[in-house]
Image (tube, grey):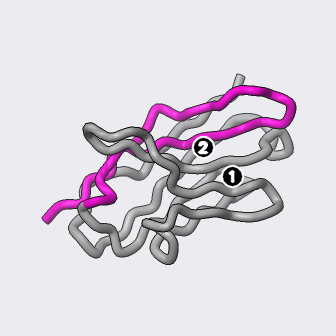
C-alpha cells in the first residue's frame, strides 16, 4: 500500500520561503517518478515539479528558478523548497507518485500554502 503524507504548508508573506515534505512508504526503487502538483481555489490542479528517479527533474515555467524538488532517499522524503513566494503560489499542494509496473497515480492528502501580506 503506497502512502504519501505531506507536511510543511502554512502562511507566508510575499517574498518568503517554505519547504514542503512528502513522506513516502516502501522502497525508493519501487518509484518511477515523484512530483508536486497544486490546486488553487476555482482552478484545476496543475503541475509544479517532478523528478524521474535517478534521471532528471522538470519544473513548470511559473516556478522554475524559484522552486527546487529533491529526494532524501534514507529518509524516504520528497521535498519542495519554495523561495520568493508570490500570492499566485497560494494553493493546496499535492504530492504525486508513479510506480514501476503500476498503471495508476498516487496522491497525498494535500497541504495548504497561503502567500499573503
Give the class, few, some or many, for how many residues have Cα within 10 Å of label 2's Cα (few <14, many ≥20): some
* x and y percentages locating residue 85 in the rendered image: 33, 68
The answer to whether 17 appears left or right of 67 in the picture is left
The answer to whether 27 appears left or right of 46 in the picture is right
Q: Is mark 2 on a helix, strand or loop?
A: strand
Q: What element carries label 1?
A: helix
Where residue 104 sits, quadrant-wise, is: top right
Task: Tell me whether the residue at label 2 lies in contact with that at label 1, contact meaning CB atoms closer than 8 angstroms.
Answer: yes
The answer to whether 76 appears left or right of 79 in the picture is right
* x and y percentages locating residue 44 in the rendered image: 39, 39
Determine the residue positioned at 32% across, 40% down. 43
Q: Earlier in the sequence, mark 2 or mark 1?
A: 2
Residue 32 - label: none
Residue 23 - label: 2
* x and y percentages locating residue 16 in the rendered image: 30, 72
Where residue 83 sits, quadrant-wise, is: bottom left
Position above or below: 24 against 61: above
Q: Is residue 60 magenta?
A: no
Total labels drawn: 2
Query: Outermost residue, left direction?
Result: 117
Q: Quadrant of the N terminus?
A: top right
Determine the residue positioned at 26% across, 53% down. 114
Give the class, few, some or many, for how many residues have Cα within 10 Å of label 1's Cα (few <14, many ≥20): few
Q: Is residue 110 magenta?
A: yes
Q: How far apart are marks 2 and 1 (CA)?
A: 8 Å
Q: What stretch is highlighted in magenta?
A: 88-117
Determine the residue positioned at 80% across, 28% down. 102
The answer to whether 81 appears left or right of 99 in the picture is left
Instruction: Indicate which label's residue lies in the foreground, 2 or 1.
Output: 2
Position above or below: 13 against 102: below
Q: Mark 1 points at which residue?
A: 75
Amino acid at each position: 500500500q503506497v502512502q504519501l503524507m505531506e507536511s510543511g504548508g502554512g502562511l507566508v508573506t510575499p517574498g518568503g520561503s517554505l519547504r514542503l515534505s512528502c513522506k513516502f512508504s516502501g522502497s525508493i526503487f519501487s518509484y518511477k517518478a515523484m512530483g508536486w502538483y497544486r490546486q488553487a481555489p476555482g482552478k484545476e490542479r496543475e503541475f509544479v515539479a517532478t523528478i524521474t528517479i535517478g534521471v532528471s527533474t522538470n519544473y513548470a515555467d511559473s516556478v522554475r528558478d524559484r522552486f527546487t524538488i529533491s529526494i532524501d532517499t534514507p529518509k524516504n522524503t520528497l521535498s519542495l523548497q519554495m523561495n520568493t513566494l508570490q500570492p499566485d503560489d497560494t494553493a493546496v499542494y499535492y504530492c504525486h507518485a508513479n510506480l514501476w509496473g503500476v498503471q495508476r497515480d498516487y496522491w497525498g492528502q494535500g497541504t495548504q500554502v497561503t502567500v499573503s501580506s
